[in-house]
Amino acid sequence: QKRRGCYECNLKNLNRLLNYEDSLKLSEARTVKFGVGASKYTEEIAIAEKYIENQKLPRSEVEKVQSIMNFLENLKISREFIKRAREALIKSDTKNAVKFLKKGNGFLISLLQVASGQLKKIKDYEIIETLICSEISKMEFLRAFLLVSLGRISSSIASLERAALFSTIIHNYKTCLTLNYLKALILLFHNLLKSAILQYNFTEELADIYEDDKLKLKCLIGKAIALYIQGDKESKRTAMDIMEEISNMDLEKNYLDAIIVF
């Protein structure tokens, strides 16, 4: 009787979470912060980014990135693809925006391969690798976002995976975690429930590795929702068990954080 009461309570909690579905969408995308992770070349990277953004630099700073100047000029060119994608979006031409971002990524991937062969100093290559991977990750995320709006879910997921990969290469684990979580959300909201559950499990594992307790809680909630929607008796029971586990946590402190994306 006590367990039945717990299940009824947890069912109410689960239904409460389900009511937030419509507002979830891709609102988590607003929290994605692109850039670099831990790097021993922080100063040079900051100078390079200012140069790419056409900011005026003192001679002392220019000298610090002189050996990679050609690649920085090419990174300026790559930003033009984002500008053209933005212009296409202003005209509501999403398909062309996606094409420009794809071309931009192709340009950057080629540039990275050239850098590997031309830059002889490891320091120079690592700086350029960091900058290029950050740009690729950003473009892939933007493509994924637009592909969802076009209903091209498989392509969107592939872009998110590449964005997460390039973020991982430059040790930007926070962005990597967010992108993996977004992947789970997209799968859930397009009723790809088995894949969503697997993705929530994987993201929860990553959150555990990087000690992100809030994200672990979000993954538990998302997984419970996916299992419950799946509809079979065993899945619903597992969903209730997860909700019972959540109900034993300090919800006063963590509940709002866990459902904020919903």
Image (cartoon, helix red, strand yellow):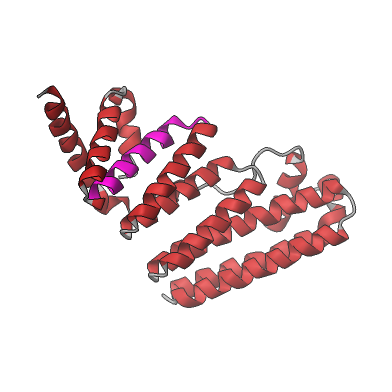
Residue 55 in view, yes or no: no
Residue drawn at 31 percent across, 50 percent down: 24
- Residue drawn 47% across and 60% down? 157
Which quadrant is the N terminus positioned in? top left
Q: Quadrant of the C terminus?
A: top left
In which image quadrant can residue 25 be found?
A: bottom left
| Residue 217 vs residue 244, the one in the foreground | 244
Instruction: Examine the rendered structure and indicate whether residue 161 appears above or below residue 61.
Output: below
x and y percent of residue 75 in the render? 71, 62
Q: Is residue 228 placed above or below 150 in the rendered structure? A: above
- As drawn, which residue projects farthest toward the left? 1
What residue is at 41 percent from the left and 33 percent from the top?
A: 214
State which region is magenta.
Answer: 211-229
Expressed as whole percent of the image width and height from the top left, the position of residue 246 reads: 29, 29
Query: Is residue 234 in sight in this rendering?
Result: yes
Residue 218: within the magenta? yes
Q: Main secondary structure of the magenta part?
A: helix
Instruction: Judge left or right: residue 168 versus residue 220.
Output: right
Query: Where's residue 68, x and y in %?
Result: 83, 56
Magenta span has 221?
yes
| Identity of the residue furthest to the right in this view | 120
Give the image location of residue 213, x and y in percent.
Answer: 44, 30
The residue nearer to you, when weighing 44 against 231, is 231
Identify the residue at image location x=73%, y=67%: 110
